[in-house]
């Protein structure tokens, strides 16, 4: 059994923002392996977040971000369960990160459920045309892959987070739910850019 030093616990805590005892427990479970302990905590955090996903989130904040000398602007509503969390600096910094991401990555929709079915059908047709002549099962896989790529390009929750390309925005939200102990929902957003058609 590897020795779980205070420094190791501190390092894991700084990387994950999880409490000392949970960090110590994860390191014990991982036999002192820092990377494995981080993975264990992420899995537990996602499980906790999924349990909280059904809880009502009616508090929260509306936040804005203006970029490039007033050329790009973002307005967003993010909800949580209590006013206490809505006023929390950690929550507000998270919302600011999401607005920065929207300004940079320009998502068109919040989630895949918001993408019009007509657009998905059109993209499926285009993708199928591009691989015409291949066996049906291969066509299906290629079309599916292209549609998944479209969702990850267009949908905020499925985009790769600009500050950490190992996570999607959905992963970041789940991590914040686990960290703050409340359900968090990105309700809606709008991004404006000068000269763009809406």
Image: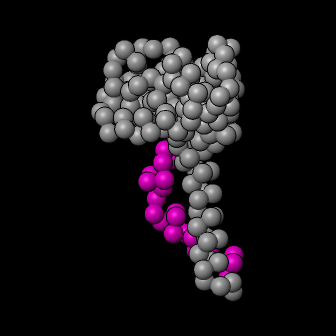
Residue 156 showing in the rendered view: yes
Residue at 56% from the left image edge and 21% from the top image edge: 24
Using the rendered view, name the quadrant where residue 12 is placed. Answer: top right
Find residue 31 and report its horizontal and vertical position in percent.
64, 31
Is 113 one of the magenta-colored residues? yes
First to last magenta residue range: 109-132
Residue at 59% from the left image edge and 75% from the top image edge: 140
Q: Is residue 151 left or right of residue 69?
A: left
Q: Quadrant of the N terminus?
A: top right
Query: In terms of depth relative to the viewer, which is nearer, 134 or 98?
Result: 134
Find residue 92 and report its horizontal and vertical position in percent.
50, 19
Q: Is residue 53 left or right of residue 137?
A: left
Query: In terms of depth relative to the viewer, which is nearer, 70 or 133?
Result: 133
Using the rendered view, name the quadrant where residue 135 is placed. Answer: bottom right
Residue at 69% from the left image edge and 86% from the top image edge: 133
Is 123 one of the magenta-colored residues? yes
Q: Is residue 69 left or right of residue 40?
A: right
Find residue 142 and report its horizontal and vertical position in percent.
65, 71
Q: Is residue 60 above or below residue 155?
A: above
Query: In terms of depth relative to the viewer, which is nearer, 6 or 176?
Result: 6
Query: In terms of depth relative to the viewer, which is nearer, 154 or 142?
Result: 142
Magenta highlight: main SS: helix
Q: Is residue 4 above or below residue 189?
A: above
Residue at 59% from the left image edge and 59% from the top image edge: 148
Q: Is residue 14 above or below residue 131?
A: above
Q: Is residue 48 above or below residue 3?
A: below
């Amino acid at each position: 059994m590897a020795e779980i030093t205070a420094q190791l616990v501190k390092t894991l805590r700084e990387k994950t923002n999880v409490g000392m005892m949970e960090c110590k427990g994860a390191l014990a479970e991982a036999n002192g392996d820092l990377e494995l302990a981080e993975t264990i905590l992420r899995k537990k955090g996602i499980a906790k977040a999924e349990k909280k996903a059904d809880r009502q989130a009616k508090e929260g904040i509306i936040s804005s971000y203006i970029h490039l000398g007033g050329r790009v602007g973002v307005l967003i509503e993010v909800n949580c369960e209590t006013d206490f969390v809505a006023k929390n600096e950690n929550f507000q910094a998270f919302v600011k990160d999401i607005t920065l991401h929207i300004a940079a990555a320009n998502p068109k929709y919040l989630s895949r459920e918001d993408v019009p079915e007509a657009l998905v059908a059109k993209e499926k047709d285009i993708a199928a045309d591009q691989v015409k002549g291949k066996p049906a099962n291969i066509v299906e896989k290629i079309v599916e892959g292209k549609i998944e790529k479209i969702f990850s390009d267009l949908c905020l929750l499925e985009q790769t987070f600009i500050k950490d390309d190992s996570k999607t925005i959905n992963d970041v939200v789940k991590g914040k739910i686990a960290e703050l102990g409340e359900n968090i929902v990105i309700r809606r957003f709008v991004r404006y850019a000068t000269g763009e058609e809406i």
